[in-house]
Amino acid sequence: MLSQEDQRRFEQITRQLRESDPRFFARLDNRVKGRRGRYMMLLTIVLWASLPAMTVLAGRLAGAICAVVLVANAALMWRFRRRLL
């Protein structure tokens, strides 16, 4: 936990760095977006892998719910991918 003075100084340094090197902050922003994409891809893989098992073990309703979540996940991934391009 930073004190008020340390927090103010940190924000001042951050602001100064952002103004002096905008490409650095652009790279940091791209890393965050990439991480979000990895989590979405991991969720997609887990859902696709579990879909048959869920359908067999929990019934058609669970399989349908999983399929709906997969479609929503695909739409979100497409939206984020389009935003990055």
Image (cartoon, helix red, strand yellow):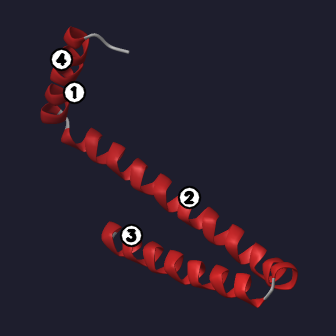
Image quarter hosting the N terminus: top left
Q: From the viewer's perspective, is 46 left or right of 8?
A: right
* Residue 48 lies in quadrant: bottom right
Label 2 Cα crowd, 10 Å radius (few <14 / some 14-19 / many 20+): few
Residue where numbered disc 1 is placed = 14
Amino acid type at mark 2? Tyr
Disc number lying in front (1 or 4): 4
* Residue 58, image x, y percentages: 82, 79
Amino acid type at mark 4? Arg
As measured in the structure, the alpha-carbon distance from the residue carrying label 1 to the one carrying label 4 is 10 Å
Q: Earlier in the sequence, mark 2 or mark 3?
A: 2
Residue where numbered disc 2 is placed = 39
Amino acid type at mark 1? Thr
- Secondary element at tag 1: helix
As measured in the structure, the alpha-carbon distance from the residue carrying label 2 to the one carrying label 1 is 27 Å
* Residue 84, image x, y percentages: 34, 66
Q: What mark, if any, has residue 8 been given in the picture?
A: 4
* Residue 60, image x, y percentages: 76, 90
| Nearest the eye: 17 or 33 | 33
Residue where numbered disc 3 is placed = 80
Label 3 Cα crowd, 10 Å radius (few <14 / some 14-19 / many 20+): some
- Secondary element at tag 2: helix
* Residue 28, image x, y percentages: 35, 43
